[in-house]
Amino acid sequence: MRRKKLFNNSALFSAKTKEKLRAFFIFCCVFLCPNFGLLAESSQETSSSSATISAVNKKIYFYNPEINIARNLVLKSAWDEYLDNGEHLEFQPVDDEADFIRLVHNSEDAAFIMADWFYSTLFLASPVEKDLEVAFQGIRDGKDTYSKILVANKGALDFENVTIACSGSKARAQEILKSIYPELSSFQLEKLNILLVPKDIDALMAVGYGLAEMALSTEVSLLKMSGLNESIYKDMIVLRESRPLKRSVLVFKSTNSAFKRHLSSLLMNMTNTTSGLKSMSLLGLDEWKLKTTFSSTLSNNITEYKNIKGGHNNDN
């Protein structure tokens, strides 16, 4: 009898419990369902926000000792403007040579723009070279080479007692002067007074205004000077010319095919926009040429982006 009563109480409890649960679910349906969509949207927004935060920009590092670091802020601004729709791509100039070398050695998924001579000198014979892929060669006026010229405003000068204006670094200036004057000793080169300026045309201006007796510059800058200041230009004499030097290269250190394909497409499209032309102009280029050694698969995927070159108003 007692067992039967307990059973009945248990059955009653179960019935009451079921009734309460049914009421709870009805409450949920009436009051909470309208908010399910809002809760889902909130969840999606959080997920999207997390995805954006976790996205890491792919870097395009740049270093060239022939370009004064005072121009790096302008370079970054111009390139980032062009890469604005580049899906997490960022242009990063590097001021210090040692820092740039470390980045090349330590980076896993990046691109690097550097002078061809810099790449050949420091990386071509290095163990890291096997991980590097030269993808693009810089071009200007249809050529992948340029020459430095030594300009003065007097015919006869005491070479060891002059100031030589140039862009870039003192070490690079000495290297070029060594190729122009192979008869000079290392001791003589070290004694030269080098005046560093932001651009090649500034080196010519320094000569014109008496801040230096000689300038390491380019034919492009000398021609530009003829239009800017005829009185300075007419007194300038080209003393000697360097051997042909290769222009900048873009090198990948990445196994990410999507990244390489996307950046390659952007580079090939630079001549189509004002910001792209400006970005190349600041590097002394007017187009990028795809290297034949670059992956044939990537080449086939980006040939459609080739365009007629433009933007010939840049300074080297």
Image (cartoon, grey):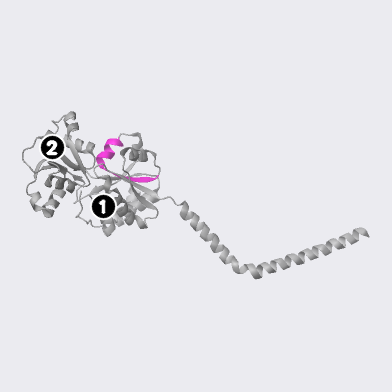
What residue did someone put label 2 on?
162
- The magenta stretch spans residue 249: no
Please indicate whether residue 313 sits to the left or right of residue 250 in the image. Answer: left
Percent position (x, y) of residue 232?
Answer: 9, 49
- The magenta stretch spans residue 111: yes
Crowd band around label 2 with a 10 angstrom C-alpha radius: few (<14), some (14–19), many (20+): some
| Residue reaching furthest to the front | 210
**Is residue 306 at least partly visible in the picture?**
no
Percent position (x, y) of residue 253?
Answer: 36, 43
Above or below: residue 33 compared with residue 187: below
Question: Residue 51 got which mark?
Answer: none
Amino acid type at circle 1 is Met
Magenta residues span 109-124
SS type, badge 2: loop
Asked whether the residues under the numbered discs 2 and 1 touch, taking CB atoms below 8 Å apart as contact, a structural biologist would say no
Amino acid type at circle 2 is Val
Q: How many marks?
A: 2
In the picture, residue 172 is in which quadrant? top left
SS type, badge 1: helix
State the residue at coordinates (86%, 62%): 9
Percent position (x, y) of residue 273?
Answer: 28, 59
State the residue at coordinates (37%, 48%): 59
Percent position (x, y) of residue 266?
Answer: 32, 54
Q: Earlier in the sequence, mark 2 or mark 1?
A: 2
What residue did someone put label 1 on?
280
| Residue reaching furthest to the left | 155
